[in-house]
Amino acid sequence: MGKYSDNPAAVSALVQQHQVHRDTYIDAEIYALEMKHLFANTWVFVGHDSQTPAKGDYITTQIGDQPVIMVRHTDNEIHVLLNRCPHKGTKIAIDRSGNTGKFFRCPYHAWSFKTNGCLLAIPLKKGYADTDFSESEASHGMLPVGAVQNHRGFVFARLAATGISFDDYFGESLSSLDNMVDRAPEGRLEVAGPPLRYMHKCNWKMLVDNQTDTCHPMVAHESSAGTAIKLFEDSDWPDDRPKPMAMEIIAPFMSPYEFFEEMGIRTWPNGHGHTGVHHSIHSDYSMAPDYLDSMTAAHGAEKAQEILGENRHNTVYFPNIMIKGPVQQLRNFIPLGPDRTLVESYVYRLVGAPDVLLQRTAMYNRLINAPTSMVGHDDLEMYERAQEGLHVDGLEWINIQRLHTEVEDYSAAQVENGTTERQMRNQMQAWAHFITVSMGGTTEEAAQ
Amino acid sequence: MTVSRDDVIDFLYAEVRMLDEGRFSEWLDLWLEEGHYWMPLDYKQADPDLVTSLLYEDHFMRRLRVERLNGERTFSQKPKSRCSHVIQRPFIDEFDAQAGRFVTNTSMHYVETRLDEQFLLALVATHELRLVDGNLRIANKRVDLLNCDAAFGNIQLLP
Ligand SMILES: [Fe+2]
């Protein structure tokens, strides 16, 4: 029993609208409560179903600190199972992906399980004949998560057996995911290779915050984006030669504050939100002509224009992923500790679209999100400095007050100036709700 | 000029010495413009283009990287990183003096450090070299990290 366990009032008190207490980023007990409650009560991204295209295909990953296996069952449905043999605890699979055939077999004592988790067989089963084995939890097989939803290929799970439904949790925010998938002439995406894996010595929420932090690119990324523009201007690049693709990607990071103010931010209930309502750093990407043709053929001219006219920048799906629809990218901020986060950055192929789009998408990933990325280096430097700086006593709050004027209502969608920190406030309000909702007692009662 | 096997090997040693001593602008001059510096993300990756790599840098990106390392507001390089390559004697897999084309395979241990942090990477570098106007130049370079699929923190210099 510490300061925060079983004390939802104390946890809620860490989040005010305009500031949050540093313990949400550095305290080990808070981190443990996030794993136990926040990541159990929310819908967390697991994987894309093209990572497991055939029956028996699986990937291993985690939801919060819970190791899971996402697997395609014999009926073609995706199942998400906790990665633990019900017998002695051995992880059933540890490779990042594979095919297990019709069943999983624990390598320790050969207990086997159907790919929906049900216990299939135990060697020398008669050893349990006169026991109450059927009463024990081990007899149920591998434990499934509370609920799974496959939304147009993107698989989410809720660990808790009961709680908010998928549709209520995401609501209108699914329009960003839908736009990303609609950009494929055939209406589906396929994962393109393994993800970049980038280790960050900082809290996972620093990364989530950064996704809608529109006041940092022109400062933190001057060394890469600013230098790129300078190099290009000095290069006497011939007008008739296409600009380097890298310039198209990096240069917009140096856009002035006004650009980011005007692009807008939209927030949705439950902590979701996105930058780039009216335009974004992805708006001016060059268009492959044959792509426009195939989109028009698939959707009709008007609908195709509507899909491609939406150029949202970063969409945060609370708690811990970000997608870029126009780039077909997803970044997963996997918590490993209060001061440790693994960032996995995936890219997807628009099925039916020309390769040049995937070429740009793969380039975007390595230029911006790789451990070798000139842009990523400066972001990580800032996160790690902040993680250390937050230990300063006597100055214990993180300010998220930009463009906060009055008491805000986060229960409906709203569009604001693109430099507001409203989305960070929105996330932390959702945080306070989903971490305390299963802690026992209401926060109101406890506060009295 | 006729190129000997020793010339090829000396060139590779000189290249890593440049990197270790932070002479990045000189290193840029070793390259032929159209060449790529490739560091795959996946073990035995065949495609540099339609899946993600750690690096796949053309002339423009290599210059940008070096300019940035030298820049004033490069926050992740305040203070600067340092690196060290320990290289094994290269294999010369192709030696075509007539065409002026050489392919080498070199195992290295790469150490990078900054502040109190230091990490080690084991790698194999594959160089395609060309003889141009009497000088050996890098036409392409591929760096395969032994643990390319592991999660890394910042790798800021040039393995
Ligand atoms: Fe950034």
Image: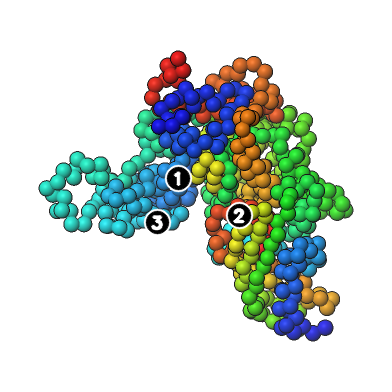
To which residue does mark 2 refer?
Answer: B52
Amino acid at the residue labelled 2: Thr
- Name the residue beneath numbered marker 1: A62
Side of B15 relative to A35 (left or right) = right
Tell me the quadrant of the picture where the C terminus of chain A can be found. top left
Q: Is residue B120 visible?
A: yes
Report which residue position mark 3 lands on.
Answer: A99
Say above or below: B49 vs A62. Answer: below
Counting residues from the N terminus, which is met first, the one under dot 3 or under dot 1? 1
Residue at position x 41%, y 46% in the image: A67
- Residue B73 image position (x, y, % from top left): 78, 46
Q: Note whether B67 is above or below A379 in the view shown.
A: below
Question: Dot 3, how many residues are within 10 Å of its Cα: few (below 14), some (14-19), or many (20+)?
Answer: some
**Where residue A391 appears, x then y in whole percent?**
60, 37
Q: Residues within 10 Å of mark 2 (few under 14, many from 20)?
A: many
Count of numbered tags: 3
| Disc 2 C-beta below 8 A from ligand 1 | no
Letter of the chain that mark 1 sits on in the rendering: A
Kind of residue at badge 3: Asn
Pointer 3 chain: A
- Whether callout 3 and callout 2 share a subunit is answered no
x, y percentage for residue B154? 64, 52
Residue A232 horizontal/vertical position (percent)? 82, 50
Residue at 23%, 45% in the rendered image: A139
Which circle, 2 or 1, is nearer the viewer? Answer: 1
Q: Chain of mark 2?
A: B
Q: Secondary structure at mark 3?
A: strand
Is A350 positioned to the left or the right of A6 in the image?
right
Name the secondary structure under disc 2. Answer: loop
Q: Secondary structure at mark 1?
A: strand
Where A315 sits versus A130, above or below? above
